[in-house]
Amino acid sequence: MTKSKHTLSAEERREKTLMVLTPVASVLLALIVGAIIIACLGKNPLQGYAALLQGSLGDLPKIGKTLERACPLIFTGLAAVFAYKCGVFNLGGEGQFIMGGCATALTVFGLGLTGPAALALGLIAGIVVGGIWGLLPGIMKITRGLNEMITTIMLNYVAMYFMEFVFKNLFSDQGLPKTPAIPKDGRLPELLSAHIGVLMAIILGIVIWYVLFRTSFGFKIRATGMNQTAARVNGFPVRRLVLLSFVISGAIAGMGGSIELLGKAPYRLADGFGSGFGFDGVAIALIAQLNPIAAIVVAILFGILSTGGTMMQSVIGVPTAIIDITRGLIIIFAVAGMAMIKLPAIKAFIASIGSKSKKVEANA
Amino acid sequence: MDIFITALPTILKAMAMGAVPILLASLGELFSERGGLVNIGLEGIMAVGAFVGFAVAKVTGNLWMGLLVAMLAGIAVNMIYAFCTVTLCSDQVVTSMAINILAPAIALFGYNLFVGANPANATGEQMASIAIPGLSQIPFIGDALFNQTPVAYLAFLLVPCVAVFFSRFRAGLSFRSVGENPQAAETLGINVVRMKYVACVVCGALAAAGGAFLTLCYTPIYTDGIVMGRGFIALATLIFGRWNAFGVLAASLLFGFFDGTSVALQAQFQAAPIMFFKMIPYVFTIVALIFFGSRSAGPKASGKPYLREQR
């Protein structure tokens, strides 16, 4: 692997630079469009972005809050990355996340657990049930050839209503539409004003990067994602790999749901738990070019936008939906940009610029 | 059984109502996939259609104007998709997923500005139903099926039109050839790129009309997430209906039926955990796909980018 780095051709190196530059440019471009929208509303965009940074990274508690906001997105983002690397377009991150949270709640409240037992068993239950929720569309895909995009979305709604059943009927807090809070000693410990789940998410990202890019299992997963036929010809168990990627992806998202419940205030299931995290995860994975480490960075960026957006709303009075638009634009620009640099005409243009600058260098 | 018979008119009414948005979006997707473009962004386009239809109808007081502007907005959103996939040859699934994230955000932003400026804007206009004389007098099914909003009638009328277009008209046949084999179509003198853009215009307009139906004829309010996965159910409908207009109609009615059953059961057993009834349409979509879903009948070149210079 290290050897191949030295033997990269000029064109390959250029492509790699562009792969990194495109998402960065998309973020900047989206922020500029966001600024234009703010200006059109008659507000000062610079003041707005200053408030955004102030509100998300202003002091340690705020950074902690931002990281806690980013934590579930890291999980759903990693879940999406892992699945797409195997060619599985898992849109069910939200459902798997919710089912993970439900499993934790059911384990903790159902068995009346407290203390470390609640923490450990709750987490395990979340991971297992998230994996099972990912397994279902996987079985449908490999046995009946069903499009996982549709089945995973449908399962998201089933999970959402199941969660409603949990917090309204099974474990309602005095008849209110929410579960009681997780007992104090069963929560995730805090570390520098953020719960320890953030650290777990980052470690998980590094582990996933290692598995995907440095192990033979990861190689098989990636090979299946790139070309199923070639992988099958090579004797890789394609169906089993696809199924496994569904399960692992679901387990990652389920773990995220579990950690969200155990670590983040208000430590309970209620309406809106996990809402939108699945699609955010998809966006993060795509902007990060399916790189787990980059996914963590993008998820933190999303966290900054979300927590800072609230501050921006209160300071200059623009709706937080502007942040949602900015996020949507980042992904559109990233997708369009990635496609654009692969077009033959654009490729030739970039190559011509590259060779020209080389000639200039040579002449000088 | 008695319960079922008394509930039947409710179910049928809800079935016809629930089928229309799915039918419209699914017909839009039919055009898109016949033109070789898989667009899973229906959900997002429907959200924009729902909001724009709601807001314009409220401001102008003209529901048809709301529908028209909603369709234009849907076309505008889908042009982003068209430009990225047709001109830039980006991945269709990924791009339409991006639309699914961007479009609802635009709709929510518009809603925040619209209702934030004036809270009285929260409740919109509703289209009145028109009963067809005679037919609507049929017991049980008459009121349910022949007392609909004009948009619903138009949607159902669209089905035979689309079927005839694809099977009898030259334009429809060349459309299909683009989805089956764009290279061959190009050699026959068909402008593949233009065809694909036309497909996107039709798809955007119909999906947005489906979304606008939700706010103009279904409920008088707009909420974030009002589409509730109908855009994805429409994708399932297309597979279930085998890429055929009448098949899509039958499938939409079936999905509408389960939507209606869910509504009727919720009304019947209010003490029971009604969330399980709400799951019915989604669970049924999966079950239907398990038994009847097969990808084999779809257009062959659907989902593949078309680069003109490429052989």
Image: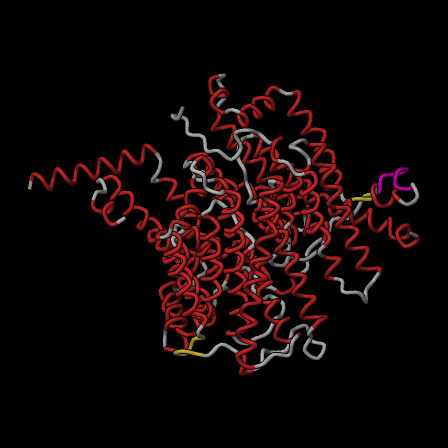
Q: Is residue B3 left or right of residue B248?
A: right
Quadrant where the C terminus of chain A sits is: top left
Residue A83 seen in the current view: yes
Is residue A241 rendered magenta in the image? Answer: no
Residue B73 seen in the current view: no
Give the vertical position of B225 relative to A233 (above or below).
below
- Magenta region: B131-137
Residue visible at 50% across and 21% down in the picture: B185
Residue B1, percent from left and from top: 91, 51
Residue A114, percent from left and from top: 58, 81
Residue visible at 41% across and 26% down in the picture: B308
Q: Residue furthest front?
A: A235
Give the vertical position of A115 relative to A6 (above or below).
below
Q: Residue furthest top?
A: B188
Give the vertical position of A73 relative to B242 (above or below).
below
Give the vertical position of A148 relative to A256 (above or below).
above
Residue A43, percent from left and from top: 42, 64
Residue visible at 64% across and 25% down in the picture: B166
Q: Is residue A11 left or right of residue B263?
A: left
Residue visible at 65% across and 65% down in the picture: A163
